[in-house]
Image (cartoon, coloured by chain):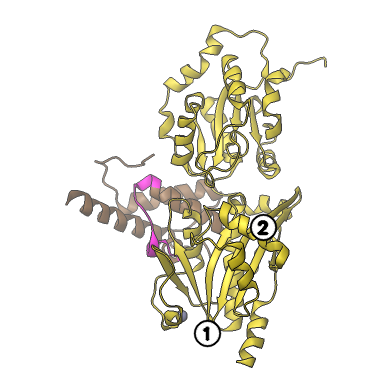
């Protein structure tokens, strides 16, 4: 299931909103974009794994190797940056 | 009985050790238990819908259901790594059924308890009752209409079944704490070794290195003062899960080398991999050593990949790994970590030996 079709531009703003929505729905707590989810104990290591799989499925990216480091998932801002970067990379490769 | 029980309109099946005899990630050619196909077809003909809630790799599991000729019977299948109560409730919601019209069948008492904990109206059945279900009143509508027989096709027309790839969150800490989980890490003795060998053979999914250690090889390492062979058992309030993990560690003066870490698929969703890694990292920090871990990525050990990386293992170069030489085997990466102190797990009690102390004694001699 892809949240975004080919023609829908994905901005940092919409992405951040979607990830915040996903978190709110799953952990039943409101979080701030720059809140450290792990330090505050909001997110368990098991949920972190679900987060990885969700981001991959929703945005059609593969998060592997060094990109899997916890720091990339610490905040909603961090995840937004990661998704945008990986989508840019995938697009560049796809259009080459 | 004066009153007829509420009819079950949808039965949600677990796959591993419920529909088929074994664990798909350990045996790609798992076969159906006898009588399962007949039960599914019989209930389908009565208008009872079938669905799936399985902790599995989505594509592998769905392909296997297609190979077995059963995929067409399942509506809104939920295959992923999330908690089953979410999956079953989502199925009920998609079908617009009340939860009391939905049933769930699974071999694991912990999964049935998890569903009951969050969705008490859903009726849960143990897997060994699967072939008896068609004889139960709640699965026996008095009148089976033509429409009932066609019900599945009608539901299926409305959605793209194989496009479903939902993911859910893992079991929450609140539920995990109700299980009274106790993890015991111990130094393996002669008796443990045969079980260890079976585990490294069987738990291919979570065998991070993909390197098999034979009974003889492990026995030799048991006697080696530089190696630690550790076995892991897990117990919950329903009883023991048995041997669920094995670690093989080689000590160097400034570095511990994790050569093998395998955990059973069954305990993945308890976060067992993360608990083990955090314990080991804490021990290494107390011993003042760095950690290196061999890891070979396969299409089956994704969860372990994430567990290693989230625990802090990375590709960053460090001079300490020079003593290890080249990784054994093709595609084996060597991950590295500067060990720091870690908190004890909050979801289970942990019993473990003090590796740090033993290391200190050995260093004193060296
Ligand atoms: Zn190092």
**Chain coloured yellow in the rendered structure:** B
Q: Where is residue A34 in the image (x, y as percent from the top left)?
A: 44, 63
Tell me whether the residue at label 2 lies in contact with that at label 1, contact meaning CB atoms closer than 8 angstroms.
no
The front one of A21 and B298 is B298
Q: Which residue lies furthest to the front in this view?
A: B216
- Asked if marks 2 and 1 fall on the same chain, the answer is yes
Does the magenta-highlighted stretch encompass residue B150?
no
Report whether the residue tagged 1 is closer than 8 Å to ligand 1.
yes
Q: Mark 1 points at which residue?
A: B254
Q: What element carries label 1?
A: loop
Q: What stretch is highlighted in magenta?
A: A57-70
Judging from the image, mark 2 belongs to the subunit labelled: B
Give the residue drawn at x 59%, y 79%: B226
Q: In this view, does A87 lie to the left or right of A41?
A: left
Pick the quarter of the image with the N terminus of chain B.
top right
**Residue A49 shows up from this direction:** yes
Number of residues whose C-alpha sits closer than 10 Å to that of mark 1, classed few (under 14), some (14–19) or many (20 or more): some
Seen as rendered, the residue at the extreme left is A96
- Label the brown chain with its letter: A
Answer yes or no: is residue A43 visible: no
Q: Which residue does the numbered mark 2 point to in the structure image?
A: B195
Which residue sits at x=56%, y=34%? B31
The residue positioned 58% from the left and 16% from the top of the image is B47
Residue B320 vertical placement versus B160 (above, below): below
């Amino acid at each position: 299931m892809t949240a975004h079709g080919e023609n829908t531009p994905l901005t940092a703003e919409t992405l951040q909103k979607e990830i915040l929505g996903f978190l709110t729905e799953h952990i039943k707590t409101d979080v701030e974009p720059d809140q450290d989810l792990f330090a505050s104990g909001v997110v368990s290591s098991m949920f972190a794994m679900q987060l990885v799989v969700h981001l991959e499925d929703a945005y059609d990216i593969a998060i592997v190797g060094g990109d899997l480091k916890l720091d990339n998932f610490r905040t909603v801002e961090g995840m937004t940056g990661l998704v945008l970067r990986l989508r840019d990379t995938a697009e560049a490769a796809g259009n080459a | 009985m004066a009153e007829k029980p509420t009819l079950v309109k949808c039965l949600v099946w677990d796959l591993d050790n419920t529909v088929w005899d074994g664990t798909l990630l350990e045996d790609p050619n798992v076969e159906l238990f006898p009588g399962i196909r007949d039960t599914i077809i019989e209930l389908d003909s009565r208008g009872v819908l079938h669905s799936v809630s399985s902790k599995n790799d989505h594509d592998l599991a769905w392909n296997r259901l297609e190979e077995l000729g059963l995929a067409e019977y399942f509506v809104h299948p939920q295959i992923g790594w999330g908690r089953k109560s979410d999956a079953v409730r989502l199925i009920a919601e998609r079908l617009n059924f009340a939860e009391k019209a939905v049933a769930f069948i699974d071999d694991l008492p912990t999964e049935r308890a998890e569903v009951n904990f969050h969705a008490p109206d859903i009726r849960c059945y143990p897997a060994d009752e699967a072939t008896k279900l068609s004889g139960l009143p709640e699965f026996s509508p008095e009148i089976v209409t033509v429409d009932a027989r066609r019900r599945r096709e009608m539901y299926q027309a409305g959605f793209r079944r194989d496009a479903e790839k939902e993911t859910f969150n893992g079991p929450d800490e609140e539920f995990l704490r109700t299980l009274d989980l106790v993890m015991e890490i111990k130094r393996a003795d002669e008796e443990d070794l045969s079980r260890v060998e079976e585990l490294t053979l069987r738990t291919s999914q979570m065998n991070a290195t993909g390197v098999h250690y034979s009974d003889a090889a492990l026995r030799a390492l048991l006697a080696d003062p530089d190696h630690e062979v550790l076995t892991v058992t897990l117990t919950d309030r329903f009883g023991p899960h048995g041997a669920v993990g094995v670690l093989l560690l080689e000590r160097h003066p400034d570095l511990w080398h994790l050569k093998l870490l395998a955990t059973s698929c069954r305990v993945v969703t308890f976060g067992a991999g993360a608990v083990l890694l955090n314990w080991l990292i804490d021990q290494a920090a107390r011993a003042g050593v760095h950690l290196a871990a061999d890891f070979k990525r396969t299409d089956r050990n994704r969860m372990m990949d994430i567990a290693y990386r989230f625990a802090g293992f990375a590709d960053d170069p460090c001079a300490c790994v020079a003593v290890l030489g080249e990784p054994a085997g093709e595609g084996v990466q060597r991950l590295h970590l500067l060990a720091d102190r870690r908190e004890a797990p909050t979801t289970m009690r942990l019993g473990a030996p003090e590796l740090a102390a033993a290391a200190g004694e050995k260093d004193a001699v060296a």
